[in-house]
Image (cartoon, coloured by chain):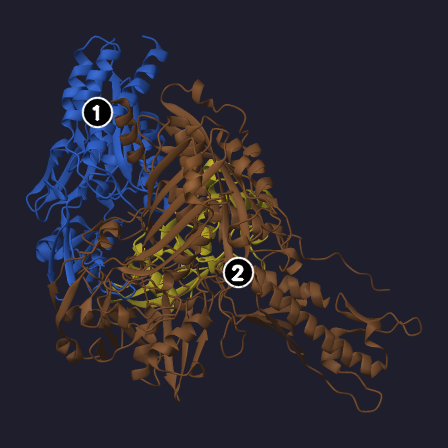
Chain colours: A yellow, B blue, C brown
Amino acid sequence: MKHQITCKINDEVTRMEVESHRTLLDALREDLGLVGAKHACVSGECGSCNILFDGEVVSACMILAVEADGAEIITVEGLAESERLHALQKAFLDHNALQCGFCSSGMLVSSYALLQSVSRPNEQEIRAALEGNLCRCTGYADIIKAVQVASRARR
Amino acid sequence: MVIYIKFGCNAIRRIPEMNEWTYSDFYLERGGNLHPFDYAKPTSLAEARTLLAQTAADGVVLAGGSDVLRRIEEEVIRPQVLIDIKGLPELRGISFSVHGGLSLGATTTISALAAHNDVRRHYSLLVKASHQLGSLRIRNRATVGGNICVALPQTDLPPALLCYDATCHLLGPEGERTVPLSECYKGTRQTALEPGELLVRVTLPAPAAYSYGAYHTVRQGGQTTVVGAAVLARRASGPSTEWRIALAAAAPYPLRAYEAETHLASAEPGAAMVEKAAELAMRAAQPADDIRASARYRRSMVGVLVRRGIEEVIEQLSGRGR
Amino acid sequence: MVTRKPHIVGKPFPRVEAELKVSGRSRYIDDIRFGPDLLHACLVPSTEAHAALLRVDVSAAREMPGVVKVLTGQDFTAWLGLFLKDRPLLADDRVRYVGQPVAVVVAESREIAKRAASSVMVEYKSMPASLDVMAGIEADAALVHPELASYEGLEHVTPITGTNVGDHVQLQWGDMEAGWADADVVIEHTYKVGRLYHASLEPHGAVAKMEDGRMTLWASIQRPYTHRTMIAQALGLEPGQLRVIAPCVGGGFGGKAFPCIEAIVAAVARELPGRPIKLVLDRRQEFACAFMRPGLTARLKAGVRRDGVITALKAAYYWNVGASVDAAIRVVRGAVLAGAGPYKTPNCEVESYAVYTHEPPAGPMRGNGMAELHWAVEQHIDRLADAIGMDRLAFRLQNLVKGGDRLYGGRVMHATGLETCVRGAAEAIAWSEQSKSLAGDGRKVYGKGLAAMWNPVVAMQPLGVTALVTLDNERICTVSVGGVESGQGIYTLAVQLVASELGVPHSNVHFERVDTERGSLDWTATSGHLTWTMGNAVVRAAQDVKRQVLSFVAQAWDEPIGNLDIIEGVIVSYSPTSERTLNLTDLLSEGIATADSERVRPSFEGKGFFQATGRPALDSGDEEPRIPPIIHFSTGAQAVEVEIDVETGVTRVLQMAPAFDVGHALNPDIVRAQIKGGSVQGLGMALLEQIRFDHGFPLNRTFKDYNIATIQDIPKRIDPIIVEVPQDDGPYGARGIGEHVLIPTAPAIASAISNALGIYLDELPLTAEKIWQALEIQDT
């Protein structure tokens, strides 16, 4: 069954025709070419496909595309303002908060959501916000640091 | 521990913890491809009821999707249609009154629950349990109703709800009926819900004049609760204290430890009382062996966590004086 | 006047590919579009650990609309192997492990491919499986490879035919009898390490396309040249017919060092010329059919004198390599070269056996066997120290190998920062101060632990490594190497080295992803080789291209080349008379008028080649040519403090102080990042990660039941200590780091736990339940 859906993705109103059983992740990646969110576990366990859905962090692999009708979505591609990197992206880059980069999109989106709700998070709050994002390379410490730096840079 | 039946290229395995059969592990191509199904999003209870009745066993209710979509993806279930209940106003929202208590719409997300001011003030044990449930991205989708209806042993919210004597409001073809949460569970993945019935909301009685709850868990790797114990004490007026103890991942489904509760209410306060209650809780537990822990370890941890919970609660109580 | 800017080597420098990654613009294999012609492959894997294939019925799949091709092991025979061809592409007449590909289906869509694969009927006749290493070496064990003797392989690989031993090697020095006689205490013990997933966040994926008799393979892999050689060999192609391109790679850790599904995708692409074929795994499949780290059973026996001298050590390492040893040959062989640990052992006997089992094939994992081996050695060192009542740190310091010490075979240890690392790590956790253990409230106890490590870096192939540096008007300067950026930062390193050697601003230097058509040969790309081998090749390529530029300009200006240099992108003449300057970019865009001809616009290509020339592991005489030369030993240490909840067994690491001798930290930020990342991976390995099998069937399916460390598991403090004792033949004295950082962490954590509880735990991982169980036994 096909559905017409309309949602706002990275500030752009987008209309799509999607099958009932299509995941939002597949729709973003394959229909819209927004490949920043990654397929890493497809069962909602790793956070690599995290996006902002009506302002909240969710895993796009565990949502149907049709459920996004009327939703406002931000992906990692939408964090930068025009060509300028977001403070978080800059801090991730400057502080080695990424290595292979496969988890980075999800990490950044989760961190972005955190900074939306807590402007100067402490270490515990950062840990709590990122506990659902797995990373096999960095050991997380530099990610914590990058989020802290970014939170200070924004003010 | 696990039974296999083989045919063709598929291995069917029974995972006791989930009480279900899974056979999809071995199609070696990237998943994320859900088998085709239809999707319906009713906007009224009447419409939802009709849909549920029409689709019967082929229809599956979709709320947060954290469990359902995963099971579809793993081909544990193959529904013909998903009925998205997030469009039903009756299933939404949190309401509270000092005398009437708390009402939680079934599609209330765990995040919304944990952020609600009245919940934080009067039912803080729910908040503590919520924080242990998955990670933020799960809590932002997962719902109160879903966490109950999956009827899995390791769910974190139900023990806290059990402590508050929660009641489930079920709506079926014959109308609405209520079932205490403690009677809702029939086994792993089995609830008192009849076919065509929908969990509409969960209600909690008015808060006690004073109550304090503790939720202790053993977890490793920051993911799933290996064992959890919720302990709650409440006082109306006067010195008598009412106790509630409920367990996660210690039985086929979330479980009240009644005998431990009774003991706490009647025994002479002191270390012996706490030990005995912990022991009674251990006896009540019927934990499983699975990939995360052995039954023996789980049972023993029930004792440790219940004792710690009681101790924490008693410390709080005594801190407040009489 | 142009002045020389400070060196950018040895300084923090942001990763060159990071901007693409943070903006979601880097392209991994699954992100690349291959157009409407793309076909999708799906594997049909074995569900049996050991069974004869009575029938593989693919008729239903073949008839399904949209199915383009179905292949089974009956359709073609191809075996994979770099050292020993012991891995059939598709199961031949039997399956040897659960997850082994039996058939592959290719269809117009993923859905059809998946449906068709599920329609394939396989009839198995179960056979007894060999699932235990120690039982597997017995004479009556079920054989994984009964025809082992007929397998094609390199001469130095020595299987024992008629057994499950796929390779073995021994090394002995000193006088064992005298060593035992001299000992006051002899301790014998067995240690075990289970199998692990590499668990890179990006699963395996490949796309292959055959066109005009040539094939292109895009794949998430670590070593394109190894893949090219092995896959071409298996499919009967000339290496030149196969072009391998590695896009951005989302982590490897050794799991992508040897081909697995890539070879199957290539095999079907050969059958379907003109159309690209794609196979990207998801997590469950990744866990089911990619490589696993080998398991290890280590039997150690050591003698020690009361004064702290180790008199003799006998070590036997039995590696569980699953159904294939090929990818683990270097693990098995390296074990004898480091088998005694980084300690002075005058009398020593080390054996290492690769034992086949009916489990998934072993692939090397970060540390290349050394993480497993040090799990045993370092704990044994703790036991020895405890037995003679000596402080564990003091015992180590007394016995550590130092520069100038004689090793086996007459080899002399090179200068090393090992002792500095051990002291530094110990100091960072205040080793001499009592842990809080005595002050614990009875529920929580605290302990401190330490482990040292060494890793013999051996010269791999006699092929060497090349690098290219090109200068042209379009991109100014491009460096291309044969190693893949999989997160370790090698492109950044290459850019830094080129900018520094050539004398141009780093913003002028670009990197190129690996393409075997264009790039530079590199066989190594793993095992901590890259900094060393690729680094040297890059330095030489940059020097070469610089020479070309200067000689070109010298000719035009009619000046001796010795007068010229390039500084910050400007060609300058130091000639007292001329003082001429020319921007390199101007040279490339506008050319230069030469004395006797018109203006030409030049482009340059510099090549660099590096071939390690190390001393053999053993000096001539009793030399065993089977052991490749060791070039050097990388060394380091890890120190940790842990907190244990004695009622639940839950252990938290409070602090980590990893210290490594990196020769020269070419990019200190990246070095520290590697150290932290490796330490946390080691933490996961120590406390959390475990694959459980049920009759050869791996039960862990997803990250839900295979727990890698999360952000909540890491300690509050991880303070890397960089020690720099330059390596003779390293670029700027540098040596690798990525591989080594995983090695000492798990034994350090075990050491801290035994320090806190007085309990030795011999088998990884140290789960809460295992610790609880040990405490329970201790109580009774």
| Residue B287 visible, this angle | yes
Please tell me if label 2 and label 1 are on a single chain: no
Location of residue C476 by image quarter: bottom right
| Residue B207 visible, this angle | no
Residue that badge 2 annotates = C529
Give the side of residue C135 with respect to residue C583, left or right: left
Say which quadrant the N terminus of chain C sits in.
Answer: bottom right
**Which residue is most to the bottom?**
C597
Give the side of residue C521 with respect to residue B131, left or right: right
Q: Front-most of C134 and A8?
A: C134
Determine whether label 2 and label 1 are within 8 Å by CB: no
Residue at image position (54%, 75%) is C519
C130 relative to C685, above or below: below
Closest to the camera, between mark 2 and mark 1, is: 2
Residue C4: assigned label:
none
Give the side of residue C640 with respect to residue C666, left or right: left
Q: The disc labelled 2 sits on which kind of residue?
A: His
A63 relative to C307, above or below: below
Disc 2 to disc 1, how far (Cα)?
57 Å
Residue that badge 1 annotates = B245
* Helix, strand or loop at mark 2: loop
Q: The disc labelled 1 sits on which kind of residue?
A: Ile
Give the side of residue A149 with respect to residue C218, left or right: right
Q: Front-most of B35 and C775?
A: C775
Label 1: how many Cα within 10 Å (few below 14, some 14–19, many 20+): many
C654 relative to A14, above or below: above
Question: Residue A1: horizontal and vertical position, in percent?
Answer: 21, 67
Question: Residue B209: horizontal and vertical position, in percent?
Answer: 28, 17
Label 2: how many Cα within 10 Å (few below 14, some 14–19, many 20+): many
